[in-house]
Amino acid sequence: MRSNRARRRRRVGRKPIKPVVLLLVVVILVTVGLVGLLVAHVVPKSSGSSMAIRSTTRHTMPVLKGVGLSPQQYTSSNFLAMLGNVHDDGSVVIWSGNWNDLANNGSTPYALSRLAGQYGYKPIIVIGAGNLQPQDETSFVTTARNYARMYQPSYLGLGNEVNKLYANSPTAYATFKRWFSAAAVAVKQVSPSTSVFTTFQYEQLNGMNGGLSGRIDNPAASEWGLLKDFPDADLLAFTTYPYMVYQTPATIPANYYSRIRKHTSKPVAFTAIAWPSSEEAPGYTSSPQEQADFVGRFASLTKGLHPRFVVWPFLYDQGTSVPFAYTGLINFNGAAKPAMSVWRNVTF
């Protein structure tokens, strides 16, 4: 069934705009030569208590929330200012990038992990599965194992939006499944307490590819069966941008996220949730209040899932391409949007 938002977009008559893959956006943002500055300009951690949120249900594991690595400007001082204030926005900072970046212990994910103890946040690293070459399998596994051995992370993501990889190249996806299994075993050998996961793009998983995605909605072509391809995963994670297919937060169906439980009993997490505060493309309207409403709506729709963590990808508007240009919780000038207050006070 096609969403109201997708039908409305067709009446507008605009050519659908294919979204940028969030992974590529983050890679561009973090590869700006600032890693050395981050380490060289370490400042004392500001005082403050952790904002980890505990579920109000019988589930006793803390539900972490946080943001993606997304400072106001890409200077060392702005990076450190963001990390210094991380407790205002959650207890997690997530980085997503190419798996090759994790092979360099001077890279951004390593810097983020080194600074975690000083600034009091939990780093979550998600390495992508792009540019797979059969001869790289050993390097992929070794890279994940070496990072896990050094930092003993609580969570480690292997593969970002892997159903997109499946859609683009089933052969590459089959290769990645093998890599994931081998890497998960290797990580557990050196860091038994690390929860290893992979991520799926949720709207595409549901067969909802209309609206800003530039494809036709076809829920009958859902990809739920892919969740069974990762038996070695400790949990399954998702990115979700429902504004691409629904007109307002209120029109998101009540079972939109709870349907996950029909397809897996594994714990879940959300590595990126977002709704814009302004028009992302002609005909795709939104507002600051609509963005704030989505935060509360998402919390309500996922209550029964008890997610391990929930991440808002952009703290600040980043000036990225459609459809993520206005998805920050703070605008370009540093003014907090209404969604920021809701985010800081929401529980999952």
Image: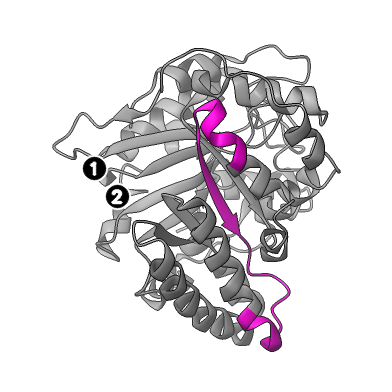
Q: Nearer the viewer, residue 10 or 197?
A: 197
Label 2 residue SS = helix
Quarter where residue 334 is shown: top right
What amino acid is labelled 1 in the image? Answer: Gly
Disc 1 crowd rating (10 Å Cα; few below 14, some 14-19, many 20+) is some
Q: Is residue 316 above or below residue 180?
A: above
Query: Residue 295 at what x, y percent from top left?
Result: 46, 28
Q: What's the mark number on residue 304? A: 1
Position in image of residue 315 (x %, y %): 63, 28
> Mark 1 vs mark 2: which is more N-terminal?
2
The residue depicted at 50 percent of the width and 21 percent of the height is 87
Q: Is residue 242 above or below residue 293?
A: below
Q: Which residue is mark 2?
A: 258
Which region is colored magenta? Answer: 114-138
Q: Is residue 315 left or right of residue 339?
A: right
Queried whether the magenta region covers residue 342, the answer comes back as no
Does residue 268 appear in the picture of this structure? yes
Left or right relative to 228: residue 8: right
The answer to whether mark 1 and mark 2 are in CB contact below 8 A is: yes
Please check the rendered image and state whether residue 125 is part of the magenta-colored stretch, yes or no: yes
Q: Amino acid at mark 2?
A: Ser
The image quadrant where one finds the C terminus is top left
Q: Is 255 situated left or right of 222 in this image? A: left
Residue that lies at the very extreme toward the left in this rendered image: 58
- Figure disc tally: 2
Residue 184 vs residue 243, the one in the foreground = 184
Q: Residue 206: percent from the left, percent from the top? A: 45, 61
Q: Secondary structure at mark 1?
A: helix
Residue at point 32% right, 42% down? 254
